[in-house]
Image (tube, rainbow, N blue to C red):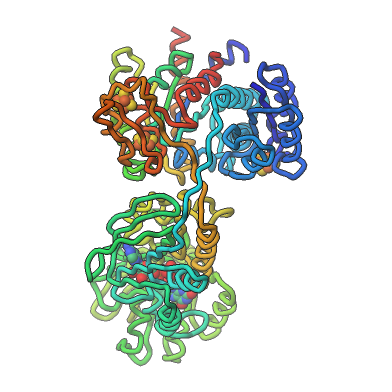
Amino acid sequence: MSQDKAEKNPEIIGFACSYCTFKASEMAGSLRLKYPDGVKLVQVPCSSRVDPAFVIKAIFEGADGVFVAGCHPGDCHFIKGNYFTRRKIAALKEMFDAFSMNDKLRLFWVSAAEARRFVEKVTGMYNEIKERKNVRKEN
Amino acid sequence: MKTGIFICHCGHNIKHTVDVKKLSAYFRKISGVTVSEDYAFVCSEPGQDLIKESIEKHDLNRVVVASCTPGLHGELFKDVLRKSNLNPFLLRRVSIREHCSWVGDDIEENTEKARRLILSALYGASHYVPLEEKVVDVTKSALIIGGGVSGLSAATFLSRMGMHVYLVEKEAELGGHVRSLKNVWPIGQDGSTIVANMVKDLESSENVEIFTSATIESFVGFFGNYEAMLKTPAGETKIIVGGVVAAIGFSPFDPRLKPELNYGKDERIVTTLEFEQSKDILVLPEKPRIAILHCVGSRDEQIGKAYCSRVCCINALRVGDAIKDKYKDSYVESFYMDVRAHPKGGEEFYEDTQEKGVLFTRSNIAEIIPTPKGLIIRGEDTLFGETFEREFDLAVLSIGMSSPEDSKLIASLLKITLDKDKFFLEAHIKLRPFDTAVKGILIAGSCSGPKDVEESINHGRASALKLYAFLNLGYAIVDPFVSSVDPKRCSGCRMCETACVANAIKFNEEKRVVHVEEAACMGCGLCNATCPSSAISLRGYVDAIIDDEIGALLEAI
Ligand SMILES: Cc1cc2nc3c(=O)[nH]c(=O)nc-3n(C[C@H](O)[C@H](O)[C@H](O)COP(=O)(O)OP(=O)(O)OC[C@H]3O[C@@H](n4cnc5c(N)ncnc54)[C@H](O)[C@@H]3O)c2cc1C
Ligand code: SF4
Ligand code: SF4
Ligand code: SF4
């Protein structure tokens, strides 16, 4: 990919829970819903498997944005994994805030049935990051 | 590392929008990759043979299949590895169909994304280790939740196959909604007779235990060995079952959610269900004027119910039919959006009712206004584009089917998912309509969406058959993705123990370290993400795998 294109196309890494958000992404594909190719997923058994270190690693290695996505609160296949995720990500966000990077991290709840919501969430995040990137470049 | 990469064309599905030739050529040059092929249909027999032969010929120790999503052909490719004497957990699937070719239009971008996904799989899989497939015994018994027609048919089937069945019904009587229908379409039989026959069948079986006025208090365990606590009038009972059929039915739509219809405020406004139960005692004038409203609580975005309830058109037709039979000189007008006379014989029945003199007006109804003389119905005729007001003696609301009252409760107990309308979500609406995402938990009848009696019975029987096939093996292979502790690294802080919901982590007072009880571990990996000493890791998802997948996705390694 050329340098210019890479700059215009933000890289977004998403950690997606096997039981819900990853399923929603599979369904989005089957339904031929379109979303930017800059969004790439890492499949995890539960959103609670996501160690904050993974998020930091992804940012250090060049991701423009990272999201963690799991089942809606109360629906976790592992009973309450996503409550732990919520706490962990909230703490991490505060840290990101201190470095003015809070726009780089998101937490979404997307159930297995919500293919459209998945596409809306990732596209929304992608577009916001892309816009900000281009503004920064102009300044 | 000797990796074989197999990139699927899926006919045109992938090949059209991903340059598979370029990819296979690219990966041939990557170190650690021994074989890199692209093939028309990797899941076909020759496709499987290609993998098998490559494994044997090149002594491969990793296999990456880049094709459809891992959820499809779950066991198929694992079997190919087993047959080639390679541990099935050395396989990595990459979804380049659902994640690349079907979500982007630009072949260059899709190919680049596919390249990165395959690269990340390659790096991740390099940390895979052979895992042992554990075999566990399975209890040959089933729990059926809900005693409507779907639950009854599932229970009957399973008990006839010789399986022990526990049937739990929260009401005092079995039969669900069908019990209160007076004239089940299209057979014209009393619903209570249909149900009584089904119950008689079931009660004559020896291996069935029926609990009425009973509910489920708790539910734990895993496929083959679930433990449920039932609350029954006689007290609490613990049962052990191999699997579950959830058949908790539906809730009739409550027309109070549409206040403009004034339901509940005037006795002359009734639902189809109430009409059914009381039509013989309804006091109507000699030449009654009756309005029938279709789609009350269905196909209505404003109240968040966009789906069609399937049975309400027929119910509306039945009301018209019954009134015309009883009162030759009645004026019956049906207000509809379009008539969906779903099952077999429905269209003919629609014509019959038209011939009997029921009038059909395509319309949007704005409101029902009760007055001392009658009910005024105000609406818009959508064929003529005119508004109208007409007076009636009775309005019958053909109500739809809403998700069951307990859907959230049962879903959270069983750890299954609801769809956007709060019905149970099937694992795949076309390919796996009886399963949920949880193995051994099946769904039956209208709890997964509106169905008529025949469909509910079919669904119940099919789910029962599927559960039977699962349980009758007597054993199950469980995923070996459980956590384990490296005692040398463990500092004994016990943070993992606090985090683990499954109580799978035990502390050894003497050695001051923890260990994981594998049978109890659910495989979530929360402990792995919690441990400050990196002492505990989830097999199949260890840190190195995920770290390298991230690195490869971002081209940082
Ligand atoms: C007005 C109306 C008329 C209809 N007329 C016809 C017709 O003429 N012909 C036709 O083919 N179909 C008709 N239907 C559809 C028919 O009612 C359904 O197809 C059928 O009832 C579905 O059966 P089921 O077993 O899925 O659910 P249900 O009949 O709803 O049974 C579910 C059972 O589960 C129990 N339950 C719920 N929650 C729990 C819990 N937490 N624990 C334990 N038990 C629980 C309930 O008490 C109930 O007994 C009609 C529907 C309506 C609304
Ligand atoms: S393996 Fe999957 S992608 Fe390939 S042909 Fe079969 S269904 Fe299509
Ligand atoms: S969190 Fe880690 S270090 Fe602490 S007890 Fe558990 S395994 Fe040992
Ligand atoms: S993976 Fe989950 S269930 Fe297993 S020990 Fe760790 S926290 Fe407990």
Q: Can residue B315 be seen?
A: no
Residue in front for this viewpoint, B336 or A115: A115
Residue at 30% in and 72% down: B212
Residue at 56% in and 32% down: B130
Q: Is residue B397 above or below residue B34?
A: below
**Image mark count:** 0
Quarter of the image where ligand 3 sits: top left
Q: Quadrant of the N terminus of chain B?
A: top right
Horizontal arrangement in the rendering, residue B555 relative to residue B256 (left or right): right
Q: Quadrant of the C terminus of chain B?
A: top right
Residue at 36% in and 72% down: B209
Query: Horizontal and vertical percent for residue B211?
Result: 32, 71
Horizontal arrangement in the rendering, residue B256 relative to residue B288 (left or right): left
Query: Horizontal and vertical percent for residue B297?
Result: 39, 63
Residue in front for this viewpoint, B93 or B315: B93
Query: Horizontal and vertical percent for residue B243?
Result: 44, 58
Give residue B19's quadrant in the image: top right
Give residue B245's quadrant in the image: bottom left
Q: Is residue B79 above or below residue B108?
A: below
Query: Horizontal and vertical percent for residue A128?
Result: 43, 23
Q: Is residue B404 above or below residue A87?
A: below
